[in-house]
């Protein structure tokens, strides 16, 4: 772990993009950088820690796990994003976070982050907007779990992960049946059957780890 005393992360973190050099120096002078190997748990749900994390490089996954071991993935965060800001209420961690690939994070003590928010209202507003955005996403997930069947949840994940490329919807992120099952709270077997049906029906096709949505997904399975 080493101290970061230069403001270069402003180029990587959109939340800091319009701050002055001296403002960044103030924040990052109190920040440490830590490397996390792949599959390392960074935060455990329920524990009490007092840091906010900025992703300098790598990718992490936010997830929940029940007492019987069932797992639900909440979100994947990429380089340039931050997490752990809910610790502002000093409560226990509400979810676990694991490094999906080797990742380097800037670790900001809660006291430093809180003081920084107080002194920089524009930055505080961006943090609030980020929390609102994430809350809206969680509400959509709750609605999906409550109102959609397994096929509807699979279709939603496929469409949300796809980006338009050469007039086609393409999913480049590796997305296995198990990955989807974790995200929608279903069994891998059920998801595999749905993906097989969509493939045989010509709705999706796979080329290595890339999935292309070849035609409009059916409303019902």
Image: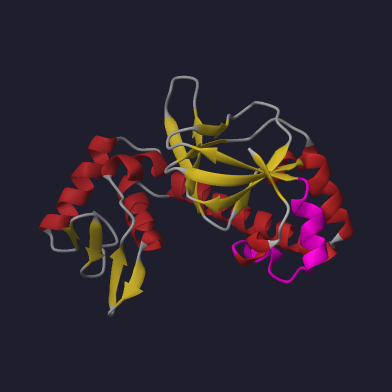
Image coordinates for residue 154, horizontal then vertical, percent: 33, 51
Q: 128 and 8: which one is in front?
A: 8
Q: 146 and 5: which one is in front?
A: 5
Q: Residue furthest bottom?
A: 167
- Where, by quadrant of the figure, is residue 216 drawn? bottom left
Against 164, residue 58 (above or below) is above
Image coordinates for residue 140, horizontal then vertical, percent: 52, 54
Would you say 75 lies left or right of 45 here?
A: left
Would you say 21 lies left or right of 152 here?
A: right
- Where, by quadrant of the figure, is residue 157 drawn? bottom left
**Residue at coordinates 34% horizontally, 53% vertically from top-left?**
152
Against 176, residue 140 (above or below) is below
**Residue at coordinates 23% horizontally, 65% vertically from top-left?**
212
Rendered image coloring scheme: secondary structure
Quarter in which the N terminus is drawn: top right
**Residue at coordinates 78% horizontally, 34% vertically from top-left?**
90
Would you say 133 lies left or right of 202 here?
A: right
Find the magenta span and give its range: 12-30
- Where, by quadrant of the figure, is residue 72 drawn? top left
Q: 155 and 103: which one is in front?
A: 103
Q: Residue furthest top?
A: 68
Let me know if residue 55 is in the magenta part.
no
**Residue at coordinates 31% horizontally, 61% vertically from top-left?**
171
Let me know if residue 16 is in the magenta part.
yes
Image coordinates for residue 70, horizontal then vertical, percent: 42, 27
Would you say 199 lies left or right of 112 here?
A: left
Image coordinates for residue 101, horizontal then vertical, percent: 42, 44
């Amino acid at each position: 772990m080493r101290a970061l005393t230069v403001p270069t992360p402003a180029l990587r973190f959109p939340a800091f993009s319009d701050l002055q050099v001296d403002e960044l120096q103030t924040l990052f002078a109190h920040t440490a950088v830590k490397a996390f190997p792949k599959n390392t748990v960074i935060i455990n749900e329920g524990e009490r820690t007092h840091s906010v994390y900025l992703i300098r490089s790598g990718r992490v996954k936010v997830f929940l796990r029940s007492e019987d071991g069932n797992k639900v993935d909440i979100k994947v965060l990429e380089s340039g994003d931050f997490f752990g800001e809910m610790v502002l209420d000093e409560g226990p961690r509400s979810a676990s976070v694991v490094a999906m690939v080797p990742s380097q994070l800037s670790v900001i003590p809660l006291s430093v982050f809180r003081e920084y928010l107080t002194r920089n209202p524009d930055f505080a507003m961006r943090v609030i907007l980020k929390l609102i955005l994430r809350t809206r996403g969680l509400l959509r997930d709750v609605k999906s779990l409550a109102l959609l069947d397994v096929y509807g949840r699979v279709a939603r994940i496929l469409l949300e992960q796809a980006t338009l490329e050469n007039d086609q919807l393409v999913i480049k992120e590796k997305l296995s049946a198990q990955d989807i099952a974790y995200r929608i709270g279903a069994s891998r077997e059920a998801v595999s059957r749905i993906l097989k049906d969509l493939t045989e029906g010509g709705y999706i096709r796979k080329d290595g780890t890339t999935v292309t949505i070849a035609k409009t997904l059916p409303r019902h399975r």
